[in-house]
Image: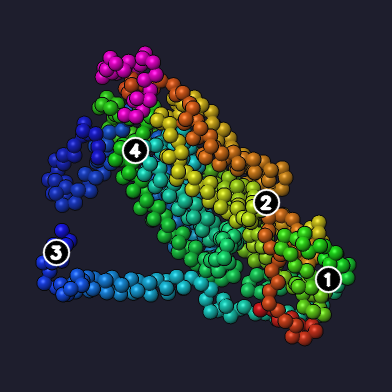
Amino acid sequence: MAEEAVTDSPDLVAGDGVRRRDFINIAAVSAAGVAGLSILYPLVSQMSASADVLAESSTEIDISAIKPGQAIKGVFRKQPVFIRNLTPKEIAEANAVPVSSLRDPQTLAERTKEGKENWLITMGVCTHLGCVPLGAGEGETKGEFGGYFCPCHGSTYDTAARIRKGPAPKNLEVPQYAFTSDTVVKIG
Amino acid sequence: MSFPWAQQYKPTNPFMRWMDDRLPLPRLVYNSLGAGYPVPRNLNYFWNFGILAGLCLGLQIVTGIILAMHYAANAGVAFDSVEHIMRDVNWGWMLRYAHANGASAFFVVIYIHIFRGFFYGSYKAPREMVWLLGVTIFLLMMATAFMGYVLPWGQMSFWGAKVITGLFSAIPLVGEPLQQWLLGGFAPDNAALNRFFSLHYLLPFVIAGVVILHIWALHIPGSSNPTGVEVKTESDTVPFYPYFVAKDGWAVGAFAFLYCVMLFFFPNALGHPDNYIPANPMSTPAHIVPEWYFWPFYAILRAFTSDFFIVPAKLMGVLAMFSAILVWFFLPWLDRSPVRSGAYRPLYRKFFWALVVDAVILGYCGGAPAAEPYVMISQIAAIYYFAHFLIIIPIISAIERPDPLPFSITEAVLGKDENVPLSASPTAPFPGTQHANA
């Protein structure tokens, strides 16, 4: 039937069997498809973080008051960030762990800045489902590995904030940061 | 479609005749909820839960629209606006409690409705589409309920949003950007609250649309019934109006009584006190739990504590939790038994009750802290849950010898049916499967 329609059509372009109407069909549907996709893009993109949310993406924190063995909670991207001044004993504990035995193998040196190994700066966001682990605040439990303990599903982190036990897949994330002076750290 | 003996809509009022020629809406109602819809005469009380679910949806939409007139979906004031509803708005406390307890009531009704389907094989041919649409409605309900629980912007709201959107971060490669896209930021905040409110308002109307498809698909073969034997003759049915309209009215009264007991005497019994603390992104409550109706699925999520080959524990938990519902989509093809009703399936019946017990155990563990022995119990119960659908049901449907089925609904009700042909008398050995296929 289609064959008949083609031969009968006055629009037939001689020789190659392509009708002018086929071309118009393909062109129109393609144009509508491109238009549809270009309308879809802003509809999807509007849900991403807006400019004002992204503008809050860096923060400066004064760390001069944190004594060895203490930690504070800062705010970075509306999420807690833990800044911890490790004691020599905690550093030794972290370095004593064979790296190959870890779920997410990293040394303490890889998680801190050179010459500032006592400053452990990590997100206070459990890598399991995003709860805030305990251990940074005064009197909070640090868990059996002396780092952090997440109360939601029992993930336990060591003194280098590396995952040691529980469902979390990764170590506590180390955000981008830089020491702007000896007492101020800029996160983000 | 309807049975040939269904009563015909014959309007006598001139206006109704005029209307019937132009927009036959009264005819549609007559044929779906009136005397024009013949229903099996033996339906028991479990067949009232469909109408109760519809009632709950209506209740939630009405109370929800009113609450939206007083609520402000902004992270700065959302918590205060809920307290404003509770303390300042006339009858606001009642409307909010009605909405919050209405969600729980909706899930009680829907769980009974679903387990009615499990027991009586309501998902089997020719009603697979009814079942698939029903599971879709349930998924939409879960999404709606989750987003609604975020709106008061208390501690449980905030951390519930964080944990549930955190599930998406388990997806390899695209997980983190996907979570940030869903939240419109790095953590739940104003952007997330606003879009959850927008979708929480939208989804009930989507549910209402799928409910219409669900009822439409149901009315093609007509309602199932406790014997699982299909309707054969007029004596197997009674008209929906007045018989089941009256019975549904009774069920609505009984439901309303229990609902009002909860609403007026135990309005916070199913809630969590932590949600009366404003959201605090810096401090996680010691014990995060979702609302009770999510507990069984939450237990399955938490049951995975170690990596499974190359799949990380976190992703495994998320996949298992979603699979726990997705497996229902395959149920009509996993259960190959030609006998529909659990009443005639002695072996299936036992495992049905085992599934009920298993679901209750999962629910209990999901509400308990993430510690032993609950984790281990969750693991065993989760394995059994999947085994029920993927292993036990296919095996039972292959090896089970069902009890003899009655010839017809009429015979099941009255003990005799004049239409029984001599060849298929109930005393003949095992006449069941033949009829079940009919």
Magenta-colored stretch includes residue B120: no
Instruction: Specify the segment rendered in magenta.
Output: B414-438
Chain for disc number 1: A
- Say which of marks 1 and 2 sits in front: 2
Mark 3, Cα crowd under 10 Å, few <14 / some 14-19 / many 20+, is: few
Q: x, y percentage for residue A88?
A: 88, 70
**In the rendered image, which residue does mark 2 sit on?**
B305
Identify the amino acid type marked 1: Leu
Relative to residue B151, is residue A24 depicted above or below?
A: below
Q: Which mark is residue B126?
A: 4
CA–CA distance between discs 3 and 1?
A: 83 Å
- Say which of marks 4 and 3 sits in front: 3
Q: Is residue B14 left or right of residue B251?
A: left
- Residue, x 58% and y 35% (percent of image)? B357
Q: Is residue A41 left or right of residue A182?
A: left
Identify the amino acid type marked 2: Thr
**In the rendered image, which residue does mark 1 sit on?**
A86
The answer to which of marks 3 and 1 sits earlier in the sequence is 3
Q: Which mark is residue A5?
A: 3
- Residue, x 31% and y 36% (percent of image)? B222
- Residue, x 52% and y 40% (percent of image)? B390
CA–CA distance between discs 4 and 3?
A: 42 Å
Residue closer to the observer: B253 or B429:
B429
Q: x, y percentage for residue B338?
A: 40, 30
Relative to residue B402, is residue B133 depicted above or below?
A: below
